Amino acid sequence: MQVPFLNPGAQTLALRAELIQALTEVLDRGHFILGPQVAALEQEIAAFVGAGLGVGVNSGSDALTLALRALDVGPGDEVITTPFTYIAPAESVIQVGARLVFADIDPRTFTLDVADVARRITPRTKAILPVHLFGQAANLDALLPLARERGIRIVEDCAQAIGATWRGRGLGSIGDIGCFSFYPTKNLGADGDGGMCVTSDEGLSKKLRMLRVHGIEKRYFHDLHGYNSRLDEMQAAIVRVKLPHLKRWTERRGEIAARYSAGLAGLPVELPVTSEGNAHCWHVYALLSDRRDALQGHLAANGVPTLIYYPQPLHLQKCYADVGWKVGDYPVAESVSSRILPLPMYPELSDAQVDHVIGVIRGFHG
Ligand SMILES: Cc1ncc(COP(=O)(O)O)c(C=O)c1O
């Protein structure tokens, strides 16, 4: 049996008629950028997440950069984030000219270790950028009071966490600004690039709207140094077709995660944990194994190719060589990078495919 690692095309196929209808309407209307589809999606995502206002932008990466800019983070400021994630949050800090500060991660949830965050706070710390990695919240119980007591802003990276909640509240609605990605393999994906900021602060949303279109409020009058980060109507229309299915898809992801965890119990691997107060949206189901590379090879040989996220923590990436970070600086992130193994995870996986993956992993351990 073959089990593709990801399969974003499956959703497009299942919703083909609705998608073609929605795209045809956009073509017929002839309004292609920042039109009625984007406006409707902004309202729908904000309502779904439980934040007041949405601002569509052209990627999750831009959502983070614009969020930091909207909060006036810039040269002279420091931003604390995680070294164990996709590079976008770290890049956004560099792009606004602030100093990038990493804190190590918790060994069980792989999200920011708040005790380490606390140690790295200085008078220059302007924002903390927690990533709700793999679909569950960073430790907001500890992070929120730490930040609020010091007037530090919080930008939530929810690229992997749409539909997840913390103590009943939608991720993205808790910090100052929540940032989402509609990259095709995300839980709610467009068929191209797209992203969104959400906030309950009207002033911030107004600033985000200006930043995404060259700093303008009135056309050809540029009040801020801005960007071209507009969301297009086709992508917004596609995401709107998919949004009504997200709850069901998230439930199916939860079923698959539970099936993996039951089937893999008792093996010498560490299974993912959901920390208290969280409803996980299972963007990624990853286990930790001391024999990761051999297990990955065994899976591939048995029809289950996998991709490692993330094989090298950010502090050891070549692009940051000038900072001088070295092996040993973030030991938990380094250890997790060497042991992590994500398994196939998307709602269209059949029980038989999940059972095949479980069987192959059990076979590896004899
Ligand atoms: C945690 C995280 N943050 C940000 C991004 C950036 O999103 P995008 O690819 O839409 O720019 C991604 C994914 O791609 C991500 O996984």
Image (cartoon, grey):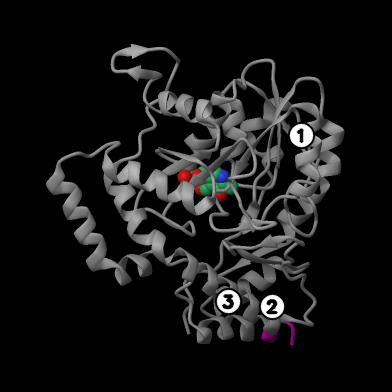
Q: Which residue of the protein is positioned furthest toward the left in this rendering?
A: 28
Disc 1 target residue: 147
**Any magenta on residue 363?**
yes
Query: For the point 45% across and 16% down, which residue is it?
Result: 225
Q: CA distance from mark 1 to mark 3?
A: 35 Å
In-front residue for pair 5/259: 259
Which tag, 1 or 3, sits closer to the chain's start? 1
Q: Nearer the viewer, mark 1 or mark 2?
A: 1
Query: Callout 1: helix, strand or loop?
Result: helix
Question: Disc 1 residue type?
Answer: Ala
Q: Nearer the viewer, mark 1 or mark 3?
A: 1
User: Where residue 339 sits in the image (x, y, percent)?
Assistant: 73, 61
Which tag, 1 or 2, sits closer to the chain's start? 1
Query: For the point 45% across and 26% down, which residue is it?
Result: 206
User: Where residue 333 sits in the image (x, y, percent)?
Assistant: 76, 49
Q: CA distance from mark 1 to mark 2?
A: 34 Å
